[in-house]
Amino acid sequence: MVQPIDMKRFAQLKAAGELPSPRGVAIAIIRLTQSNNVSMAELARVIKGDPAFVGRLVKAANGLVAENRRAVVSVQEALMVLGLPAVRTMALGFSLLSHYRKGGCAGFDYGHFWSSSLLMAISMQALMLRVRLAAPDDAFSLGLLARVGELALATLYPDAFSRLLNDIGRNPGLQQVSLEDQAFATNHRELGAAMLTDWGVPDVLVQPVRFHECPEVPGYAEGSREHGLVQCLVLSRAIAQLCLAAESEHERLMGPMLRLSSRLGIGRSDFIALCERVGREWGEWGKLLQLRTEAAPRFGELGNRAAVAVGDRGEPAGSGEAEEARPSKALLLVPEEQCRHALRAALEAAGLAVCEVSSARLAIEMAIDVQPQLVFVQWQREAGDEGQAFVRDLHDMRLRRSLQVVAVLPDNDDDALRWLSEAGADDYLLLPLGGVALKARLQVLLKMLGLQLELEREREELRNFAAELAISNRRLQEAALTDPLTGLPNRRHALEAMQVEWASSIRHSRTLAVMIVDLDELKAINDTHGHDVGDIALRQVSEVLRRALRAQDILCRMGGDEFLVICPDTDLAAVVVVAQRLRAAVEAFEPDTGGPQLRMTVSVGVAIREPGMPGFNSLVKLADQGAYAAKETGRNRVIALQAAGA
Ligand SMILES: Nc1nc2c(ncn2[C@@H]2O[C@H](COP(=O)(O)OP(=O)(O)OP(=O)(O)O)[C@@H](O)[C@H]2O)c(=O)[nH]1
């Protein structure tokens, strides 16, 4: 049973006040995201107070969108894509990264630590897009913070931890965790898990972090979500190690990674594509976070070399993926020579590549490497439970779905029949093997297996289809809220945001102002210079408006040449000042049309929420009437129809 995390020891350490903890804007973000009724505008306002975090958040959101679609560019969009819980943990992770990129622990390589954590973060995000065991954005933060316990020990005990790391450096046989337990009465795994728990990360995500360095300890069932998450963290760590290792080490590290990814149901080519994406993103993130990165390893070549290496050991090289609907590979754990030869001959005659393994201990490794669709296991009285354990292991593994295990047994032997039912093989062949009977039995077996593989392939296609559908839905949802010309939130989004801000301003008794900004004489520009030039003008003016606004204001295109600006916590005098600034900025701006020179102006109506207004429509209408009045009185002006102090 998994021991609970020791929060008592953690509480003592926390009381000392020196544990790594988020600072500055991150604290405000974490506090806000914990409240249920935070508005996106409030959150965006706080986030924009930290320009570095804005860039990281937008980058993280872009990691979730497919490579061939429009990138996320604004904080609001990023918030929509990521969701509040992910934003909270990201604020936490990035704040730690900013404030703990150096420290007083001489033996602890802070740069290497963060480069490796970043690689784990990107790898976890990419893996979750594939295996879908957790939200990819949660997984990013999880990867980033997976080894935070080590940072904590380096921060709490800089000298002692430095000595401990130096000792391990001199004698790699030492167990880091035991040394930490002796020296600090805790270790980085337990401490990291306690910190994540303290920061509100759910237990289902904390436990995999706690055990990813010792994946066998918790005894999670193969195929369970926890088991999958632990394996993903192990794999992310392996990707990070490979990316940071010397080139001479790459090939050695690639083989186990391919085996692990295959256990997670990721085919070789998919996994290589995933690693290549991680490599690309690593470079981009490295620039953003000013972390050391290197040229990404050539994963494609490494993958091919690893495939050849498997072939060298006598297994069929093949594609390594169990996706063909026709069985093509068989593995034999059949010690009796005559019997083994008969099987090999019959299988090869049926067109299968055959590989042999001599011990049950090696058989599971071989099965992961080769990914056979047929495994023959001969029962042996003197071999005890080994063969049975092997069959059970195969059973537990994901690759078991498209695999038939055939027991080879002597006829009329009660012990062997008992073994057969306990081991859970799918079929059996009775000794002696050979002749027409064996051929006929194999034919039936292969036919059944072919049908099963076909079914499995269809299921896989359905799963992929469902995953793609989920992504397309999210994309559609976003597209439905975005104006394609300017990239700004559209009318529908504007009305949703208005509803939220209206309710929030009433609940917290805060002021709320809006502006209607209407371009002057766009029709004349269209008529004189063409619609394309009108489009350029619209796009560039929207950018001018965006830049002239304050961080907390929400700019939306309502349609045509009309924009709505929502200004939370703003009174009439303040909104007039902002509106005048917008107006002046547009007037001073010269659109770069690549041709005709244009002079642009805007007419602006402003209004604030008044007690007794029945709903936000009345507020928008009042601002609209102001804009109309501005047009009527000569354009390029700001008009408020309410009296100051309203
Ligand atoms: N190029 C371009 N023009 C647009 C777009 N949407 C609306 N328009 C044009 O914007 C013009 C709006 O016309 P009006 O409402 O008369 O406004 P205006 O010409 O700006 O004049 P005033 O508002 O009175 O100053 C129309 O000619 C529309 O065709 C667009 O996406 N691109």
Image: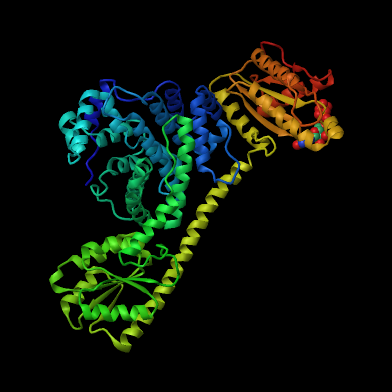
**Is 90 situated above or below 379?**
above
Q: Nearer the viewer, residue 218 or 278?
A: 278
Question: Which residue occupies the extreme top position in the image?
Answer: 645
Judge left or right: residue 356 versus residue 586. left
The image position of residue 417, as x and y in percent, is 20, 76
Indicate the quadrant where residue 44 lies. top right
Indicate the quadrant where residue 369 lies. bottom left
**Is 276 situated above or below 407?**
above
- Can residue 555 be seen in the rendering of this structure? yes
**Is 639 situated above or below 400?**
above
The image position of residue 476, as x and y in percent, is 60, 46
Q: Quadrant of ligand 1?
A: top right
The image position of residue 588, as x and y in percent, is 74, 18
> Which residue is at 37% across, 33% downward?
114
Q: How is the image coloured?
A: rainbow
Judge left or right: residue 34 versus residue 49. left
Question: Which residue occupies the extreme front position in the image?
Answer: 248
Judge left or right: residue 574 versus residue 382. right
The image position of residue 201, as x and y in percent, is 36, 36
Q: Nearer the viewer, residue 126 or 284?
A: 284
Judge left or right: residue 153 versus residue 383. right
Indicate the quadrant where residue 93 lies. top left
